[in-house]
Image (cartoon, rainbow, N blue to C red):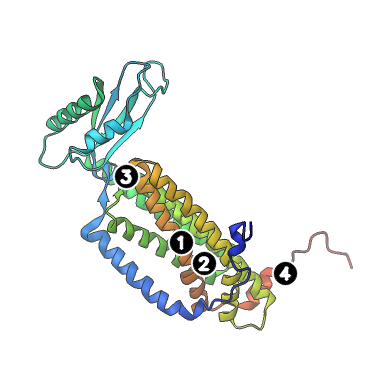
């Protein structure tokens, strides 16, 4: 069939002037980042059980009978208890995951007694999935949740610092500043979208943001590597034109990788159920933001700071191996 595969429809060579519109994109990014930071404080993140605290219990049926996880999740969700998490686990008596046992986590709203809420949850589950056994009821306090929230933020901060160190080691300082600006931009805007869409912020969201950091860094390294190569190849070409050339040469790879990842995550969001919906949406939007930042955040900052081409040439010199000859 003519035009198949569809990748042939993409132009083999593009000549877009990305740097020309970088100032406008920079202003837009600053406005969105400021709005995202404000949104994290007001109205604030919609904290899940992991960071707000709540109750958990074990729900089980006799061995060999399967308990409906969607049924349990739907029954408890109708009670208006906020974030509800249901996960299948192995039985304690034979350590086998036969689908008969699940762990349920839910929030206890302020002003409602724990005992009363637990009784309502048990009654709703029994009416939906039949007779089950409840055990191991426990409560996660606000102190433990606060420690988890702090640990999650520290993990994000440490990931950004390590990525900056890697870029600085592999390239040079100017590249490192561009990469760190792109990473901070991606993290802040992803937080802003989580607030805007009122997604539950849980440990799954922390994992999604860490994945976005890794994806964004991978895309940025590809662009920077081509930029460094072109700086060696076109020594007299203005930096603005070298950046545009590098972005155009990596554009098809960036588009194909981004569309593939977003397509898979869209399917996961549609068919993965409620438990994976928030994670998939956050990761999908984060990848789109990361693709944008590698073009309109990281590379333009290198233009702003400038690049010492002598340093690039020095990095390009081959290392001579072997023993030096004696006089």
Q: Could you tell me which residue is drawn at 51 percent across and 76 percent down?
A: 18
Quarter of the image that includes the C terminus: bottom right
Q: Is residue 155 visible?
A: no
Q: CA distance from mark 2 to mark 1?
A: 16 Å
Q: Could you tell me which residue is drawn at 56 percent across and 67 percent down?
A: 251
Q: Which residue is mark 2?
A: 176
Q: Which residue is mark 4?
A: 317
Residue 7's x, y, as percent? 60, 60
Residue 67's x, y, as percent? 32, 25
Of the image marks 4 and 2, the number of the one nearer the N terminus = 2
Mark 2: secondary structure: helix
Residue 144's x, y, as percent? 27, 41
Q: Which mark is residue 290?
A: 1
Mark 4: secondary structure: loop
Q: Is the C-beta separation of discs 2 and 1 under 8 Å?
A: no
Quarter of the image that includes the N terminus: bottom right
Of the image marks 2 and 1, the number of the one nearer the N terminus = 2
How packed mark 2 is, by other alpha carbons closer than 10 Å (few <14, some 14-19, many 20 or more), is many
Q: CA distance from mark 2 to mark 3?
A: 30 Å
Can you name the residue that lies furthest to the left here?
111
Q: Which residue is mark 3?
A: 148
Of the image marks 3 and 1, the number of the one nearer the N terminus = 3
* Nearer the observer, 73 or 156: 73
């Amino acid at each position: 069939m003519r035009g198949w595969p569809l990748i042939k429809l993409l132009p083999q060579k593009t000549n877009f002037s990305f740097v020309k519109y970088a100032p406008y994109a920079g202003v837009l990014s600053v406005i969105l980042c400021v709005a995202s930071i404000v949104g994290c404080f007001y109205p604030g993140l919609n904290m899940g059980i992991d960071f707000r605290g709540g109750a958990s219990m074990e729900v089980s049926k006799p061995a060999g009978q399967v308990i409906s996880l969607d049924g349990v999740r739907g029954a408890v969700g109708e009670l208006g208890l906020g974030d509800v998490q249901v996960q299948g686990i192995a039985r304690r008596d034979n350590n086998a995951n036969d689908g008969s046992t699940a762990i349920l986590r839910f929030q206890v709203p302020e002003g409602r007694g724990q005992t009363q809420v637990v009784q309502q949850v048990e009654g709703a589950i029994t009416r939906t999935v039949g007779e089950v056994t409840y055990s191991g009821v426990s409560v996660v306090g606000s102190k433990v949740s606060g420690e988890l929230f702090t640990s999650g933020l520290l993990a994000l901060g440490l990931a950004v610092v390590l990525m900056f160190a890697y870029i600085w080691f592999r390239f040079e300082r100017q590249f490192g500043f561009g990469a760190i600006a792109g990473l901070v931009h991606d993290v802040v805007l992803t937080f802003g979208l989580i607030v805007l869409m009122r997604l539950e912020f849980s440990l799954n969201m922390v994992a999604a943001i860490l994945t976005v950091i890794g994806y964004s860094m991978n895309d940025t390294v590809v662009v920077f590597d081509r930029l460094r190569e072109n700086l060696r190849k076109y020594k007299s070409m203005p930096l603005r034109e070298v950046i545009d050339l590098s972005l155009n040469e990596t554009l098809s790879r960036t588009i194909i990788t981004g569309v593939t990842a977003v397509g898979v995550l869209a399917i996961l969001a549609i068919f993965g159920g409620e438990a994976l919906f928030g994670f998939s949406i956050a990761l999908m939007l984060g990848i789109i933001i990361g693709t944008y930042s590698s073009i309109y955040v990281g590379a333009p900052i290198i233009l702003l700071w400038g690049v010492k081409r002598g340093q690039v040439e020095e990095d390009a010199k081959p290392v001579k191996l072997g023993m030096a000859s004696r006089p």
